[in-house]
Amino acid sequence: MTTTFATIGSGRRTRFFLRLARAMPERLRVSGVVTRDPGRADALTTDSGVPAFGTVGDLLRYERPYYIAAAVPWAAMPDAIREVVGHRMPVLAETPPPQIGPVFGHCGRTLAGPAWSRWPSSTC
């Protein structure tokens, strides 16, 4: 079985995910990378053959992966999590975020530390 996922970020951790998927194509597939830096987007697409997008919404209009791995700096992680969850997608927060309060506010949940969230929750 192949698991399809996407990433947010264009740094070394995203490049690691891309190398991992390239090493195990029968198990992992990257559907796209979200980055706001056009130069890095072009470089990632050229190097990996994976399409790059400026927003999570653009990525999801192209394809809906099984989950999105957010590999962004610590301070940017809360916004990345909110953006992915706002699209009702599961998110793997690769970098533990600071205490970010009610990400799942309408469910009464809070999120701190490493996050592996499935959405929608049957308990919500």
Image (tube, helix red, strand yellow):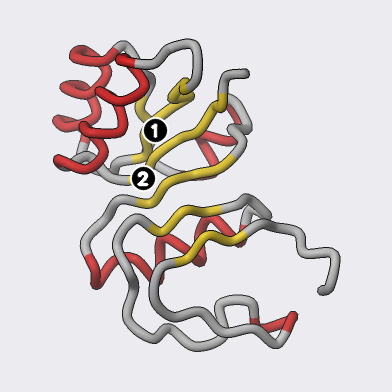
The residue where tag 2 is placed is 8
- The residue lying toward the viewer, choosing from 118 and 46, is 118
Q: Secondary structure at mark 2?
A: strand
Picture quadrant of residue 36: top left
Q: Nearer the viewer, mark 1 or mark 2?
A: 2
Q: What whole-number distance in Å separates the C-alpha atoms at marks 1 and 2?
A: 9 Å
Picture quadrant of residue 20: top left
Lateral position of residue 40 relative to residue 48, left or right? left
Vertical relation: 2 (above or below) 39: above
Vertical relation: 2 (above or below) 79: above
Vertical relation: 108 (above or below) 89: below
The residue where tag 1 is placed is 53
Q: Residue at left 85%, top 64%? A: 122
> Dot 1, how many residues are within 10 Å of its Cα: few (below 14), some (14-19), or many (20+)?
many
Q: Secondary structure at mark 1?
A: strand
Q: Which mark is residue 123?
A: none
Lateral position of residue 32 relative to residue 44, left or right? right
**Image location of residue 72, percent across then percent down:** 27, 55
Vertical relation: 89 (above or below) 121: above
Locate the C terminus by quadrant. bottom right
Amino acid type assigned to the residue bearing label 1 in the image: Phe
**Image location of residue 116, percent across then percent down:** 52, 60
**Image location of residue 81, percent across then percent down:** 47, 63
Q: Earlier in the sequence, mark 1 or mark 2?
A: 2
Q: Residue at left 77%, top 64%? A: 121
Q: Residue at left 47%, top 66%? A: 115
Lateral position of residue 112 relative to residue 12, left or right? right
Locate the N terminus by quadrant. top right
